[in-house]
Image (tube, helix red, strand yellow):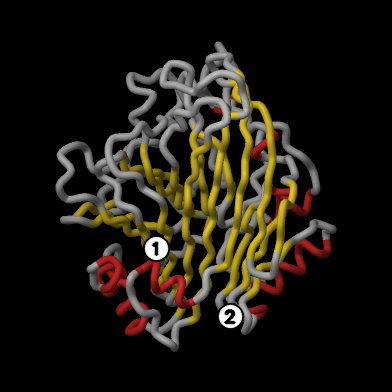
Amino acid sequence: MGTYAYDRAFFAERGIETLELTSEDGASRVLVIPAYQGRVMTSSAAGDTGDSYGWINYKFIEKGELNPQFNPVGGEERFWIGPEGGPNSFYFKKGDEQVYANWKVPAAIDTDTYDIRSQSGSSVCFTREFALRSASDRVFRIGVERTIELVDREGAEQTLGTEIPVDVKFVAYRTNNVITNRGDESWTRDSGMPSVWLLGMFNPTPTTTVFIPYNRDFAGRIVNDEYFGKIPADRLIVEEGMIYFKIDGLWRSKLGLPAGSARDICGSYDSEKGVLTVVKYALPDGEVDYVNGQWGPQDNPYGGDVINAYNDGPTDDGTVMGPFYEIETSSPGAALAPGQSLAHEQYTMHFQGDEASIGAIVRAIFGVDLNRISTMFR
Protein backbone atom coordinates (compact mmCIF):
# COMPACT_ATOMS: atom_id res chain seq x y z
CA MET A 1 0.00 0.00 0.00
CA GLY A 2 1.25 3.47 -0.87
CA THR A 3 2.65 2.46 -4.24
CA TYR A 4 1.22 3.32 -7.64
CA ALA A 5 0.84 -0.38 -8.53
CA TYR A 6 -1.29 -0.97 -5.43
CA ASP A 7 -3.69 1.81 -6.39
CA ARG A 8 -4.00 0.71 -10.00
CA ALA A 9 -4.76 -2.85 -8.85
CA PHE A 10 -7.26 -1.52 -6.29
CA PHE A 11 -9.46 -0.11 -9.05
CA ALA A 12 -8.97 -3.08 -11.37
CA GLU A 13 -10.12 -5.49 -8.67
CA ARG A 14 -13.35 -3.53 -8.33
CA GLY A 15 -14.08 -3.35 -12.04
CA ILE A 16 -13.49 0.41 -12.24
CA GLU A 17 -12.05 1.33 -15.65
CA THR A 18 -8.82 3.31 -15.58
CA LEU A 19 -6.71 4.96 -18.27
CA GLU A 20 -2.97 5.33 -17.92
CA LEU A 21 -0.76 8.05 -19.35
CA THR A 22 2.84 6.82 -19.43
CA SER A 23 6.19 8.30 -20.39
CA GLU A 24 8.42 6.47 -22.86
CA ASP A 25 10.66 5.12 -20.09
CA GLY A 26 7.66 4.07 -17.98
CA ALA A 27 8.74 6.14 -14.98
CA SER A 28 6.11 8.90 -15.19
CA ARG A 29 2.58 7.52 -14.86
CA VAL A 30 -0.80 9.20 -14.44
CA LEU A 31 -3.95 7.23 -13.58
CA VAL A 32 -7.26 8.64 -14.90
CA ILE A 33 -10.85 7.43 -14.38
CA PRO A 34 -13.57 8.30 -16.95
CA ALA A 35 -16.40 7.34 -14.56
CA TYR A 36 -15.10 9.93 -12.08
CA GLN A 37 -15.51 12.82 -14.57
CA GLY A 38 -12.12 12.30 -16.17
CA ARG A 39 -10.43 12.62 -12.80
CA VAL A 40 -6.71 12.20 -12.23
CA MET A 41 -6.71 9.76 -9.32
CA THR A 42 -3.00 9.51 -8.71
CA SER A 43 0.44 9.57 -10.32
CA SER A 44 3.95 8.19 -9.90
CA ALA A 45 7.45 9.43 -10.69
CA ALA A 46 9.00 5.95 -10.48
CA GLY A 47 6.69 3.56 -12.29
CA ASP A 48 4.77 0.82 -10.49
CA THR A 49 6.98 0.83 -7.39
CA GLY A 50 6.95 4.60 -6.98
CA ASP A 51 5.01 6.50 -4.33
CA SER A 52 1.38 7.14 -5.22
CA TYR A 53 0.85 10.89 -4.84
CA GLY A 54 -2.95 11.21 -4.90
CA TRP A 55 -5.24 10.68 -1.91
CA ILE A 56 -7.74 7.87 -2.46
CA ASN A 57 -10.72 7.15 -0.23
CA TYR A 58 -10.35 3.37 -0.15
CA LYS A 59 -13.01 2.75 2.50
CA PHE A 60 -15.68 4.69 0.63
CA ILE A 61 -14.91 3.09 -2.73
CA GLU A 62 -14.84 -0.40 -1.21
CA LYS A 63 -18.44 0.00 -0.01
CA GLY A 64 -19.58 0.39 -3.62
CA GLU A 65 -22.53 2.56 -2.58
CA LEU A 66 -23.61 5.90 -4.00
CA ASN A 67 -24.10 8.75 -1.56
CA PRO A 68 -26.96 11.03 -2.69
CA GLN A 69 -25.18 14.09 -1.30
CA PHE A 70 -21.53 13.67 -2.30
CA ASN A 71 -19.24 10.80 -3.28
CA PRO A 72 -15.79 11.61 -1.86
CA VAL A 73 -13.66 9.13 -3.82
CA GLY A 74 -10.56 11.36 -3.71
CA GLY A 75 -8.13 11.98 -6.55
CA GLU A 76 -5.33 14.46 -7.14
CA GLU A 77 -7.19 16.60 -9.67
CA ARG A 78 -10.95 16.70 -10.09
CA PHE A 79 -13.09 19.01 -12.21
CA TRP A 80 -15.88 20.99 -10.50
CA ILE A 81 -17.93 24.06 -11.31
CA GLY A 82 -18.07 27.12 -9.03
CA PRO A 83 -19.45 28.86 -7.10
CA GLU A 84 -20.11 26.58 -4.17
CA GLY A 85 -22.02 29.09 -2.05
CA GLY A 86 -23.91 32.37 -2.28
CA PRO A 87 -26.81 33.46 -4.48
CA ASN A 88 -25.40 31.78 -7.60
CA SER A 89 -24.38 28.49 -5.97
CA PHE A 90 -24.80 25.24 -7.88
CA TYR A 91 -24.75 23.20 -4.64
CA PHE A 92 -27.90 24.55 -2.93
CA LYS A 93 -31.51 24.91 -4.03
CA LYS A 94 -33.29 28.26 -4.11
CA GLY A 95 -34.53 29.24 -0.67
CA ASP A 96 -32.57 26.58 1.21
CA GLU A 97 -30.35 27.65 4.08
CA GLN A 98 -26.77 27.09 3.01
CA VAL A 99 -25.75 24.57 5.62
CA TYR A 100 -24.26 21.12 5.23
CA ALA A 101 -27.59 19.28 5.50
CA ASN A 102 -28.81 21.07 2.34
CA TRP A 103 -25.53 20.91 0.40
CA LYS A 104 -25.50 18.56 -2.61
CA VAL A 105 -22.91 18.10 -5.35
CA PRO A 106 -24.57 17.92 -8.80
CA ALA A 107 -24.32 14.52 -10.50
CA ALA A 108 -22.60 16.13 -13.50
CA ILE A 109 -19.49 16.72 -11.38
CA ASP A 110 -19.93 13.86 -8.91
CA THR A 111 -21.21 10.62 -10.45
CA ASP A 112 -21.48 11.08 -14.23
CA THR A 113 -19.10 9.30 -16.59
CA TYR A 114 -17.42 11.62 -19.09
CA ASP A 115 -17.08 10.62 -22.75
CA ILE A 116 -13.67 10.05 -24.34
CA ARG A 117 -13.24 12.17 -27.46
CA SER A 118 -9.65 11.17 -28.17
CA GLN A 119 -6.88 9.20 -26.51
CA SER A 120 -3.18 8.38 -26.92
CA GLY A 121 -0.47 6.97 -24.68
CA SER A 122 0.29 10.40 -23.26
CA SER A 123 -3.02 12.31 -23.43
CA VAL A 124 -6.79 11.93 -23.24
CA CYS A 125 -9.66 14.33 -23.98
CA PHE A 126 -13.06 14.07 -22.26
CA THR A 127 -16.32 15.81 -23.13
CA ARG A 128 -19.67 16.22 -21.42
CA GLU A 129 -22.73 18.49 -21.68
CA PHE A 130 -25.15 19.10 -18.83
CA ALA A 131 -27.52 21.60 -17.21
CA LEU A 132 -27.08 23.05 -13.72
CA ARG A 133 -29.66 25.03 -11.77
CA SER A 134 -28.34 27.77 -9.47
CA ALA A 135 -29.61 28.91 -6.08
CA SER A 136 -31.15 31.85 -7.96
CA ASP A 137 -33.20 29.29 -9.91
CA ARG A 138 -31.47 29.94 -13.22
CA VAL A 139 -30.53 27.08 -15.54
CA PHE A 140 -27.09 26.97 -17.15
CA ARG A 141 -26.39 24.63 -20.05
CA ILE A 142 -22.67 23.90 -19.94
CA GLY A 143 -20.42 22.07 -22.36
CA VAL A 144 -17.15 20.70 -20.99
CA GLU A 145 -13.96 19.65 -22.75
CA ARG A 146 -11.23 18.42 -20.42
CA THR A 147 -7.82 17.42 -21.79
CA ILE A 148 -5.16 15.72 -19.66
CA GLU A 149 -1.66 15.56 -21.10
CA LEU A 150 1.55 14.09 -19.72
CA VAL A 151 4.38 16.67 -19.66
CA ASP A 152 7.95 15.53 -20.33
CA ARG A 153 11.08 16.85 -18.66
CA GLU A 154 11.78 19.44 -21.36
CA GLY A 155 8.21 20.72 -21.20
CA ALA A 156 8.31 20.98 -17.41
CA GLU A 157 11.61 22.87 -17.53
CA GLN A 158 10.20 25.33 -20.06
CA THR A 159 7.06 25.85 -17.98
CA LEU A 160 8.99 26.45 -14.76
CA GLY A 161 11.93 28.27 -16.29
CA THR A 162 14.56 26.10 -14.63
CA GLU A 163 16.42 22.83 -15.10
CA ILE A 164 15.35 19.68 -13.26
CA PRO A 165 18.40 17.88 -11.81
CA VAL A 166 18.95 14.51 -13.49
CA ASP A 167 18.83 12.63 -10.18
CA VAL A 168 15.31 13.89 -9.36
CA LYS A 169 12.35 11.61 -10.03
CA PHE A 170 9.55 13.54 -11.59
CA VAL A 171 6.05 13.32 -13.06
CA ALA A 172 4.03 16.21 -14.49
CA TYR A 173 0.76 16.65 -16.31
CA ARG A 174 -1.21 19.52 -17.76
CA THR A 175 -4.98 19.82 -17.90
CA ASN A 176 -6.89 22.22 -20.10
CA ASN A 177 -10.47 22.66 -18.95
CA VAL A 178 -12.90 24.43 -21.28
CA ILE A 179 -16.48 25.35 -20.46
CA THR A 180 -18.86 26.60 -23.18
CA ASN A 181 -22.20 28.38 -22.87
CA ARG A 182 -24.58 25.94 -24.61
CA GLY A 183 -27.69 27.89 -23.63
CA ASP A 184 -29.63 30.68 -25.32
CA GLU A 185 -28.82 33.50 -22.87
CA SER A 186 -25.58 35.21 -21.88
CA TRP A 187 -23.92 34.55 -18.56
CA THR A 188 -23.49 37.86 -16.71
CA ARG A 189 -22.82 39.24 -13.24
CA ASP A 190 -26.57 39.60 -12.78
CA SER A 191 -27.49 36.09 -13.92
CA GLY A 192 -24.47 34.37 -12.39
CA MET A 193 -21.27 33.16 -14.01
CA PRO A 194 -19.96 29.60 -13.68
CA SER A 195 -16.24 29.06 -13.12
CA VAL A 196 -13.85 26.17 -13.60
CA TRP A 197 -12.80 24.85 -10.19
CA LEU A 198 -9.97 22.31 -9.93
CA LEU A 199 -9.34 20.50 -6.66
CA GLY A 200 -6.32 18.30 -5.92
CA MET A 201 -6.33 15.90 -2.96
CA PHE A 202 -3.03 14.66 -1.55
CA ASN A 203 -1.76 12.73 1.47
CA PRO A 204 -0.91 14.83 4.55
CA THR A 205 2.01 14.06 6.87
CA PRO A 206 3.48 15.68 9.99
CA THR A 207 6.37 16.87 7.80
CA THR A 208 4.37 18.55 5.00
CA THR A 209 4.07 22.30 4.46
CA VAL A 210 2.11 24.15 1.79
CA PHE A 211 3.82 27.37 0.72
CA ILE A 212 2.19 29.99 -1.48
CA PRO A 213 3.91 33.11 -2.80
CA TYR A 214 1.83 36.27 -2.94
CA ASN A 215 2.08 39.64 -4.67
CA ARG A 216 3.98 41.96 -2.35
CA ASP A 217 2.53 45.04 -4.06
CA PHE A 218 -1.05 44.07 -3.24
CA ALA A 219 -2.70 46.61 -0.93
CA GLY A 220 -5.69 44.53 0.20
CA ARG A 221 -6.06 41.52 2.48
CA ILE A 222 -3.37 39.02 1.53
CA VAL A 223 -5.05 35.84 2.71
CA ASN A 224 -8.53 34.80 3.83
CA ASP A 225 -8.02 32.32 6.69
CA GLU A 226 -11.51 32.23 8.19
CA TYR A 227 -13.34 29.59 6.14
CA PHE A 228 -13.71 27.26 9.16
CA GLY A 229 -12.69 29.69 11.86
CA LYS A 230 -9.45 31.62 11.98
CA ILE A 231 -6.33 29.49 11.52
CA PRO A 232 -4.08 29.52 14.62
CA ALA A 233 -0.75 31.30 14.38
CA ASP A 234 1.18 28.05 14.89
CA ARG A 235 -0.39 26.70 11.68
CA LEU A 236 -0.28 29.73 9.40
CA ILE A 237 2.69 32.07 9.01
CA VAL A 238 2.75 35.01 6.60
CA GLU A 239 6.19 36.40 5.82
CA GLU A 240 7.31 38.89 3.23
CA GLY A 241 6.17 37.43 -0.07
CA MET A 242 5.35 33.91 1.19
CA ILE A 243 2.56 32.12 3.08
CA TYR A 244 3.30 28.90 5.01
CA PHE A 245 0.50 26.51 5.98
CA LYS A 246 0.96 23.48 8.25
CA ILE A 247 -0.38 20.28 6.66
CA ASP A 248 -0.85 17.32 9.00
CA GLY A 249 -4.50 16.25 8.62
CA LEU A 250 -5.17 17.07 12.28
CA TRP A 251 -6.82 20.52 12.15
CA ARG A 252 -9.62 21.33 9.72
CA SER A 253 -8.74 24.65 8.16
CA LYS A 254 -8.77 26.42 4.82
CA LEU A 255 -7.23 29.54 3.35
CA GLY A 256 -7.53 31.43 0.09
CA LEU A 257 -5.83 34.24 -1.82
CA PRO A 258 -7.93 36.80 -3.71
CA ALA A 259 -7.17 38.27 -7.11
CA GLY A 260 -4.36 40.77 -6.78
CA SER A 261 -2.73 38.87 -3.94
CA ALA A 262 -2.43 35.56 -5.76
CA ARG A 263 0.39 34.57 -8.06
CA ASP A 264 0.18 31.74 -10.59
CA ILE A 265 2.05 29.09 -8.61
CA CYS A 266 2.21 27.33 -5.25
CA GLY A 267 3.98 24.38 -3.71
CA SER A 268 3.99 21.79 -0.97
CA TYR A 269 6.93 19.90 0.46
CA ASP A 270 7.16 16.72 2.53
CA SER A 271 10.62 16.82 4.09
CA GLU A 272 10.52 13.18 5.26
CA LYS A 273 9.87 11.70 1.80
CA GLY A 274 11.63 14.47 -0.12
CA VAL A 275 8.55 15.15 -2.24
CA LEU A 276 7.94 18.56 -3.76
CA THR A 277 4.58 19.22 -5.41
CA VAL A 278 4.17 22.27 -7.64
CA VAL A 279 0.84 23.54 -8.97
CA LYS A 280 1.02 26.21 -11.68
CA TYR A 281 -2.14 27.59 -13.22
CA ALA A 282 -3.55 30.21 -15.58
CA LEU A 283 -3.92 33.62 -13.94
CA PRO A 284 -5.32 36.30 -16.29
CA ASP A 285 -3.96 39.84 -16.26
CA GLY A 286 -6.16 42.77 -15.32
CA GLU A 287 -9.31 42.98 -13.26
CA VAL A 288 -11.54 39.92 -13.48
CA ASP A 289 -14.39 38.55 -11.38
CA TYR A 290 -13.76 35.48 -9.23
CA VAL A 291 -16.87 33.85 -7.81
CA ASN A 292 -17.24 33.76 -4.04
CA GLY A 293 -17.56 30.19 -2.82
CA GLN A 294 -18.40 30.90 0.82
CA TRP A 295 -21.79 29.64 1.97
CA GLY A 296 -24.68 31.91 2.93
CA PRO A 297 -25.49 35.56 2.21
CA GLN A 298 -22.72 37.51 0.51
CA ASP A 299 -21.92 41.19 0.22
CA ASN A 300 -19.80 40.56 -2.87
CA PRO A 301 -20.54 37.39 -4.92
CA TYR A 302 -17.53 38.23 -7.13
CA GLY A 303 -14.94 38.81 -4.43
CA GLY A 304 -13.82 35.19 -4.36
CA ASP A 305 -10.43 33.56 -4.06
CA VAL A 306 -8.18 32.45 -6.92
CA ILE A 307 -6.27 29.73 -5.09
CA ASN A 308 -7.07 27.78 -1.93
CA ALA A 309 -5.38 25.28 0.36
CA TYR A 310 -7.20 23.00 2.79
CA ASN A 311 -5.93 20.87 5.68
CA ASP A 312 -8.34 18.15 6.75
CA GLY A 313 -9.09 17.28 10.34
CA PRO A 314 -11.89 16.42 12.77
CA THR A 315 -15.24 18.13 12.28
CA ASP A 316 -17.42 19.32 15.17
CA ASP A 317 -18.67 15.77 15.81
CA GLY A 318 -15.14 14.31 15.72
CA THR A 319 -15.43 12.54 12.36
CA VAL A 320 -12.72 12.85 9.71
CA MET A 321 -13.39 12.30 6.00
CA GLY A 322 -9.74 11.71 5.15
CA PRO A 323 -7.42 12.91 6.29
CA PHE A 324 -6.14 14.63 3.15
CA TYR A 325 -5.07 18.06 2.05
CA GLU A 326 -6.14 20.04 -0.99
CA ILE A 327 -4.74 22.62 -3.35
CA GLU A 328 -7.48 24.27 -5.39
CA THR A 329 -7.45 26.79 -8.23
CA SER A 330 -10.27 28.58 -10.05
CA SER A 331 -10.85 30.39 -13.30
CA PRO A 332 -12.59 33.77 -13.32
CA GLY A 333 -16.37 33.72 -13.61
CA ALA A 334 -17.29 32.99 -17.23
CA ALA A 335 -18.98 36.04 -18.75
CA LEU A 336 -19.97 34.23 -21.95
CA ALA A 337 -22.49 34.81 -24.72
CA PRO A 338 -24.12 31.69 -26.20
CA GLY A 339 -21.48 29.60 -27.96
CA GLN A 340 -18.52 31.32 -26.29
CA SER A 341 -15.95 29.43 -24.18
CA LEU A 342 -13.56 29.95 -21.28
CA ALA A 343 -10.45 27.82 -20.58
CA HIS A 344 -8.55 27.19 -17.36
CA GLU A 345 -5.14 25.52 -17.59
CA GLN A 346 -3.24 23.90 -14.76
CA TYR A 347 0.02 21.98 -14.32
CA THR A 348 0.58 19.53 -11.48
CA MET A 349 4.17 18.40 -10.95
CA HIS A 350 5.77 16.08 -8.39
CA PHE A 351 9.51 15.98 -7.75
CA GLN A 352 11.22 13.48 -5.45
CA GLY A 353 14.88 13.48 -4.54
CA ASP A 354 17.54 14.52 -2.04
CA GLU A 355 17.43 17.84 -0.23
CA ALA A 356 20.13 19.50 -2.34
CA SER A 357 18.47 18.72 -5.66
CA ILE A 358 14.95 19.61 -4.51
CA GLY A 359 16.36 22.73 -2.87
CA ALA A 360 17.81 23.88 -6.19
CA ILE A 361 14.38 23.62 -7.83
CA VAL A 362 12.67 25.50 -4.99
CA ARG A 363 15.23 28.33 -5.02
CA ALA A 364 14.91 28.73 -8.79
CA ILE A 365 11.10 28.76 -8.85
CA PHE A 366 10.14 30.33 -5.52
CA GLY A 367 13.27 32.18 -4.40
CA VAL A 368 13.15 30.61 -0.94
CA ASP A 369 15.44 28.24 0.93
CA LEU A 370 14.12 24.68 1.27
CA ASN A 371 15.36 24.44 4.87
CA ARG A 372 13.16 27.41 5.71
CA ILE A 373 10.13 25.48 4.49
CA SER A 374 11.17 22.25 6.23
CA THR A 375 11.67 23.86 9.65
CA MET A 376 8.86 26.42 9.61
CA PHE A 377 6.57 24.45 11.94
CA ARG A 378 9.08 22.40 13.90
| Residue found at the far bottom of this picture | 167
- Is 82 situated above or below 216? above
Residue at image location 58% in from the left, 14% down from the top? 137
Q: Give neighbour class at mark 1: few <14, some 14-19, many 20+ (Cα, 10 Å).
A: many
For disc 2, the marked residue is: 46
State the residue in front, 309 or 154: 154
> Quarter-wise, where is residue 104 in the image?
top right
> Quarter-wise, where is residue 331 in the image?
top left
The answer to whether residue 147 is left or right of residue 7 is left
Residue at image location 45% in from the left, 28% down from the top? 335
Label located before the other in sequence (1 or 2): 2
For disc 1, the marked residue is: 268
Q: Secondary structure at mark 1?
A: strand
Image position, residue 120 (x, y; %): 70, 66
Image position, residue 74 (x, y; %): 62, 52
Q: Give neighbour class at mark 2: few <14, some 14-19, many 20+ (Cα, 10 Å).
A: many
Q: Locate the C terminus by quadrant.
A: bottom left
